[in-house]
Image (cartoon, helix red, strand yellow):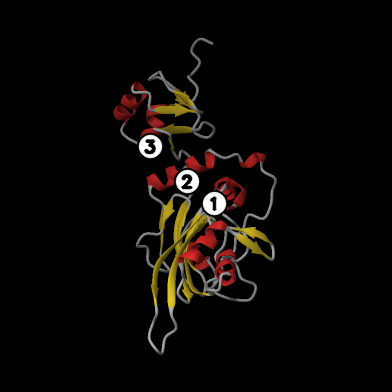
Amino acid sequence: MIGEAPQGVRLQKVLAAAGVASRRVVEQYIVEGRIRVNGVVVDELGRRIDPDVDLVDVDGTAVQLDVTKRYVMLNKPTGVVSTMKDENGRPDLRRFTKDFDERLYNVGRLDAETSGLLILTNDGELAHVLAHPSFGVTKVYVAKVEGVVTAQVIAKLTKGFDLEDGFIKADKARLLDASAGSAKAKSASLVELTLHSGRNRIVRRMLAAVGHPVTELVRRQFGPLHLGTLPAGKSRELTKIERGALLTLSRQNSPADETPGDAQENE
Protein backbone atom coordinates (compact mmCIF):
# COMPACT_ATOMS: atom_id res chain seq x y z
CA MET A 1 0.00 0.00 0.00
CA ILE A 2 1.11 3.56 -0.73
CA GLY A 3 2.68 5.20 2.31
CA GLU A 4 3.00 1.92 4.26
CA ALA A 5 6.04 1.93 6.52
CA PRO A 6 8.76 -0.58 5.59
CA GLN A 7 8.79 -3.74 7.72
CA GLY A 8 11.72 -4.74 9.89
CA VAL A 9 14.98 -3.04 10.80
CA ARG A 10 17.86 -2.28 8.46
CA LEU A 11 20.49 -4.98 8.64
CA GLN A 12 23.27 -2.41 9.07
CA LYS A 13 21.59 -0.98 12.16
CA VAL A 14 20.97 -4.39 13.70
CA LEU A 15 24.54 -5.61 13.24
CA ALA A 16 26.03 -2.34 14.43
CA ALA A 17 23.92 -2.61 17.59
CA ALA A 18 25.10 -6.20 18.01
CA GLY A 19 28.70 -4.98 18.00
CA VAL A 20 29.69 -6.64 14.72
CA ALA A 21 30.99 -3.46 13.07
CA SER A 22 29.96 0.07 12.17
CA ARG A 23 27.10 0.52 9.72
CA ARG A 24 29.52 1.55 7.00
CA VAL A 25 31.69 -1.53 7.54
CA VAL A 26 28.59 -3.75 7.58
CA GLU A 27 27.64 -2.28 4.19
CA GLN A 28 31.04 -3.30 2.90
CA TYR A 29 30.48 -6.81 4.27
CA ILE A 30 27.21 -6.95 2.34
CA VAL A 31 28.93 -5.89 -0.87
CA GLU A 32 31.55 -8.59 -0.32
CA GLY A 33 28.86 -11.24 0.21
CA ARG A 34 29.99 -12.05 3.75
CA ILE A 35 26.58 -11.82 5.45
CA ARG A 36 23.75 -14.33 5.32
CA VAL A 37 20.21 -14.08 6.65
CA ASN A 38 18.52 -17.43 7.26
CA GLY A 39 21.24 -19.10 5.24
CA VAL A 40 20.90 -16.88 2.17
CA VAL A 41 23.61 -14.40 1.17
CA VAL A 42 22.42 -10.79 1.39
CA ASP A 43 22.90 -8.90 -1.88
CA GLU A 44 21.08 -5.61 -1.21
CA LEU A 45 22.16 -2.75 1.05
CA GLY A 46 18.58 -1.91 1.94
CA ARG A 47 17.81 -5.34 3.41
CA ARG A 48 15.60 -5.27 6.50
CA ILE A 49 15.19 -8.09 9.01
CA ASP A 50 13.21 -9.04 12.08
CA PRO A 51 15.83 -9.46 14.84
CA ASP A 52 13.44 -11.60 16.88
CA VAL A 53 13.00 -14.15 14.10
CA ASP A 54 15.76 -13.98 11.50
CA LEU A 55 19.12 -15.74 11.92
CA VAL A 56 22.18 -13.81 10.78
CA ASP A 57 25.76 -14.95 10.31
CA VAL A 58 28.91 -13.17 9.20
CA ASP A 59 31.65 -15.23 7.54
CA GLY A 60 29.78 -18.34 8.67
CA THR A 61 29.73 -17.36 12.36
CA ALA A 62 26.36 -16.77 14.01
CA VAL A 63 25.58 -13.34 15.43
CA GLN A 64 23.70 -12.94 18.70
CA LEU A 65 20.77 -10.58 18.09
CA ASP A 66 18.70 -11.50 21.14
CA VAL A 67 20.17 -9.31 23.87
CA THR A 68 18.03 -11.01 26.54
CA LYS A 69 20.19 -14.14 26.33
CA ARG A 70 23.12 -14.39 28.73
CA TYR A 71 26.11 -16.73 28.46
CA VAL A 72 28.54 -17.14 31.36
CA MET A 73 31.59 -19.35 31.86
CA LEU A 74 32.26 -20.56 35.39
CA ASN A 75 35.29 -22.36 36.71
CA LYS A 76 33.38 -24.47 39.22
CA PRO A 77 35.46 -25.23 42.28
CA THR A 78 35.42 -28.57 44.05
CA GLY A 79 32.93 -28.89 46.88
CA VAL A 80 30.10 -27.23 44.92
CA VAL A 81 27.21 -29.28 43.52
CA SER A 82 25.88 -28.51 40.03
CA THR A 83 22.38 -27.41 40.95
CA MET A 84 20.66 -24.13 41.71
CA LYS A 85 19.30 -25.40 45.03
CA ASP A 86 20.62 -28.41 46.88
CA GLU A 87 18.08 -30.20 49.07
CA ASN A 88 20.85 -31.33 51.41
CA GLY A 89 22.15 -27.83 52.03
CA ARG A 90 25.46 -28.31 50.26
CA PRO A 91 27.13 -25.36 48.49
CA ASP A 92 25.40 -24.87 45.13
CA LEU A 93 25.57 -22.60 42.08
CA ARG A 94 23.36 -19.79 43.41
CA ARG A 95 26.39 -17.93 44.72
CA PHE A 96 27.61 -17.57 41.14
CA THR A 97 24.31 -16.42 39.61
CA LYS A 98 22.88 -14.09 42.26
CA ASP A 99 24.39 -10.96 40.70
CA PHE A 100 22.74 -11.50 37.29
CA ASP A 101 19.30 -10.07 36.56
CA GLU A 102 18.50 -13.06 34.35
CA ARG A 103 17.62 -16.45 35.80
CA LEU A 104 20.58 -18.58 34.73
CA TYR A 105 20.86 -22.36 34.71
CA ASN A 106 23.81 -24.72 34.37
CA VAL A 107 24.39 -26.66 31.14
CA GLY A 108 25.03 -30.23 32.22
CA ARG A 109 26.74 -31.05 35.49
CA LEU A 110 30.09 -31.63 37.13
CA ASP A 111 30.08 -33.67 40.30
CA ALA A 112 31.08 -32.03 43.55
CA GLU A 113 34.63 -33.43 43.45
CA THR A 114 35.23 -32.27 39.86
CA SER A 115 36.23 -28.70 39.03
CA GLY A 116 36.35 -26.82 35.76
CA LEU A 117 34.36 -25.33 32.95
CA LEU A 118 30.62 -25.05 33.46
CA ILE A 119 28.32 -22.93 31.29
CA LEU A 120 25.51 -20.88 32.83
CA THR A 121 22.81 -19.50 30.52
CA ASN A 122 19.13 -18.68 30.07
CA ASP A 123 19.17 -19.96 26.48
CA GLY A 124 17.30 -23.27 26.71
CA GLU A 125 17.74 -24.28 23.07
CA LEU A 126 21.49 -23.78 23.18
CA ALA A 127 21.70 -25.63 26.49
CA HIS A 128 19.95 -28.64 24.97
CA VAL A 129 22.39 -28.84 22.06
CA LEU A 130 25.44 -28.49 24.29
CA ALA A 131 24.37 -30.98 26.93
CA HIS A 132 22.73 -33.75 24.91
CA PRO A 133 25.32 -36.39 23.91
CA SER A 134 23.51 -37.12 20.63
CA PHE A 135 24.80 -33.80 19.26
CA GLY A 136 28.39 -34.89 19.78
CA VAL A 137 29.69 -31.82 21.59
CA THR A 138 33.09 -32.80 22.97
CA LYS A 139 34.48 -32.10 26.40
CA VAL A 140 38.15 -32.22 27.39
CA TYR A 141 39.19 -33.33 30.88
CA VAL A 142 42.55 -33.46 32.61
CA ALA A 143 42.76 -36.14 35.29
CA LYS A 144 45.40 -36.84 37.88
CA VAL A 145 45.38 -40.58 38.42
CA GLU A 146 47.14 -43.15 40.56
CA GLY A 147 50.00 -45.06 38.95
CA VAL A 148 52.13 -44.58 35.85
CA VAL A 149 49.96 -44.67 32.74
CA THR A 150 51.50 -46.54 29.81
CA ALA A 151 51.02 -46.25 26.07
CA GLN A 152 49.03 -49.48 26.22
CA VAL A 153 46.54 -47.88 28.63
CA ILE A 154 46.14 -44.86 26.35
CA ALA A 155 45.51 -47.20 23.42
CA LYS A 156 42.86 -49.07 25.40
CA LEU A 157 41.07 -45.83 26.26
CA THR A 158 40.82 -44.85 22.60
CA LYS A 159 40.05 -48.34 21.34
CA GLY A 160 37.29 -48.75 23.89
CA PHE A 161 35.96 -51.41 26.25
CA ASP A 162 32.81 -52.49 28.05
CA LEU A 163 31.57 -50.97 31.28
CA GLU A 164 28.55 -52.12 33.27
CA ASP A 165 26.32 -49.77 31.23
CA GLY A 166 27.78 -50.54 27.81
CA PHE A 167 30.72 -49.97 25.49
CA ILE A 168 32.71 -46.73 25.86
CA LYS A 169 35.76 -45.18 24.27
CA ALA A 170 37.47 -41.82 24.39
CA ASP A 171 37.47 -39.66 21.28
CA LYS A 172 41.08 -38.83 22.15
CA ALA A 173 43.44 -39.67 24.98
CA ARG A 174 47.00 -38.64 25.73
CA LEU A 175 49.47 -38.81 28.57
CA LEU A 176 50.53 -35.36 29.77
CA ASP A 177 52.93 -36.37 32.52
CA ALA A 178 53.96 -39.37 34.58
CA SER A 179 56.22 -39.54 37.59
CA ALA A 180 57.37 -42.35 39.80
CA GLY A 181 57.09 -40.15 42.90
CA SER A 182 59.09 -40.52 46.08
CA ALA A 183 59.26 -43.26 48.64
CA LYS A 184 56.49 -41.54 50.61
CA ALA A 185 54.33 -40.61 47.60
CA LYS A 186 52.54 -42.93 45.24
CA SER A 187 53.32 -42.68 41.55
CA ALA A 188 50.86 -40.55 39.58
CA SER A 189 50.07 -39.48 36.05
CA LEU A 190 48.24 -36.68 34.27
CA VAL A 191 45.93 -37.85 31.48
CA GLU A 192 43.89 -35.77 29.06
CA LEU A 193 40.64 -37.32 27.81
CA THR A 194 38.35 -35.97 25.09
CA LEU A 195 34.86 -37.45 24.81
CA HIS A 196 31.27 -36.56 24.07
CA SER A 197 29.54 -39.14 26.23
CA GLY A 198 27.09 -37.82 28.82
CA ARG A 199 27.07 -40.91 30.98
CA ASN A 200 27.29 -40.56 34.75
CA ARG A 201 30.85 -40.05 36.10
CA ILE A 202 32.17 -41.56 32.89
CA VAL A 203 35.75 -40.24 33.07
CA ARG A 204 36.25 -41.54 36.60
CA ARG A 205 34.74 -44.92 35.71
CA MET A 206 36.82 -45.28 32.54
CA LEU A 207 40.09 -44.55 34.27
CA ALA A 208 39.26 -46.79 37.22
CA ALA A 209 38.44 -49.59 34.79
CA VAL A 210 41.94 -49.41 33.26
CA GLY A 211 43.55 -49.52 36.70
CA HIS A 212 44.18 -45.83 37.35
CA PRO A 213 41.68 -44.30 39.80
CA VAL A 214 41.21 -40.53 39.56
CA THR A 215 42.46 -38.37 42.42
CA GLU A 216 41.78 -34.98 40.80
CA LEU A 217 39.64 -34.07 37.78
CA VAL A 218 39.09 -30.81 35.91
CA ARG A 219 37.16 -30.03 32.74
CA ARG A 220 39.27 -27.73 30.59
CA GLN A 221 37.13 -27.44 27.46
CA PHE A 222 33.46 -27.61 26.51
CA GLY A 223 32.81 -27.52 22.76
CA PRO A 224 34.58 -24.42 21.39
CA LEU A 225 35.09 -22.91 24.86
CA HIS A 226 38.41 -23.12 26.72
CA LEU A 227 38.81 -22.52 30.45
CA GLY A 228 42.08 -20.69 29.92
CA THR A 229 43.39 -18.86 33.00
CA LEU A 230 40.01 -18.31 34.68
CA PRO A 231 40.64 -19.01 38.39
CA ALA A 232 38.59 -21.56 40.32
CA GLY A 233 35.44 -20.00 41.75
CA LYS A 234 35.41 -17.16 39.23
CA SER A 235 33.08 -16.52 36.30
CA ARG A 236 32.98 -14.25 33.27
CA GLU A 237 30.61 -13.52 30.44
CA LEU A 238 31.53 -15.05 27.11
CA THR A 239 33.19 -12.84 24.53
CA LYS A 240 31.48 -11.96 21.26
CA ILE A 241 33.65 -14.52 19.47
CA GLU A 242 32.80 -17.24 22.01
CA ARG A 243 29.09 -16.47 21.81
CA GLY A 244 29.26 -16.63 18.04
CA ALA A 245 31.00 -20.03 18.17
CA LEU A 246 28.34 -21.43 20.51
CA LEU A 247 25.43 -20.07 18.49
CA THR A 248 26.96 -21.40 15.27
CA LEU A 249 27.22 -24.82 16.88
CA SER A 250 23.60 -24.60 18.04
CA ARG A 251 22.28 -23.66 14.61
CA GLN A 252 24.15 -26.49 12.94
CA ASN A 253 22.00 -28.90 14.95
CA SER A 254 18.26 -29.29 15.18
CA PRO A 255 17.05 -29.75 18.75
CA ALA A 256 13.42 -29.63 17.62
CA ASP A 257 13.91 -32.97 15.87
CA GLU A 258 15.49 -34.63 18.88
CA THR A 259 13.56 -36.85 21.22
CA PRO A 260 13.86 -35.45 24.76
CA GLY A 261 16.18 -37.43 26.97
CA ASP A 262 18.65 -37.18 29.79
CA ALA A 263 20.84 -34.29 28.73
CA GLN A 264 22.59 -33.87 32.06
CA GLU A 265 26.04 -35.39 32.17
CA ASN A 266 27.43 -35.73 35.66
CA GLU A 267 31.18 -36.05 35.64
Q: Are marks 2 and 1 in contact (CB under 8 Å)?
A: no
| Quadrant into which the N terminus falls | top right
Q: Earlier in the sequence, mark 2 or mark 1?
A: 1
Circle 2 or circle 3, nearest the eye? 2
Which comes sooner in the sequence, label 1 or label 3?
A: 3
- State the image quarter where residue 165 is shown: bottom right
The residue that disc 2 covers is 246
Kindly state the secondary structure of the residue where label 1 is placed: loop
The answer to whether one can see residue 253 in this image is: yes
- Any mark on residue 17, and which? 3
Residue 8 percent coordinates (x, y): 48, 26
Residue 178 drawn above or below residue 34: below
What is the C-alpha distance between the residues marked 2 and 3?
20 Å
Where's residue 205, x and y in %?
59, 68
At label 3, the amino acid type is: Ala
Q: Secondary structure at mark 3?
A: helix
Would you call the spot at circle 1 few (<14 residues within 10 Å), some (14-19), or many (20 or more)?
some
Using the rendered image of the protein, determine whether residue 107 is visible from the camera's viewpoint: no
Disc 2 is placed on an element classified as helix
Q: Relative to the observer, which residue lies in front, 12 or 185?
A: 185
Identity of the residue furthest to the front in this view: 152
As shown in the figure, which amino acid type bears the numbered disc 2? Leu
Give the CA separation, mark 2 to mark 1: 14 Å
Going 30% across and 33% down the picture, which residue do you hit? 22
Earlier along the polypeptide chain: callout 2 or callout 3?
3
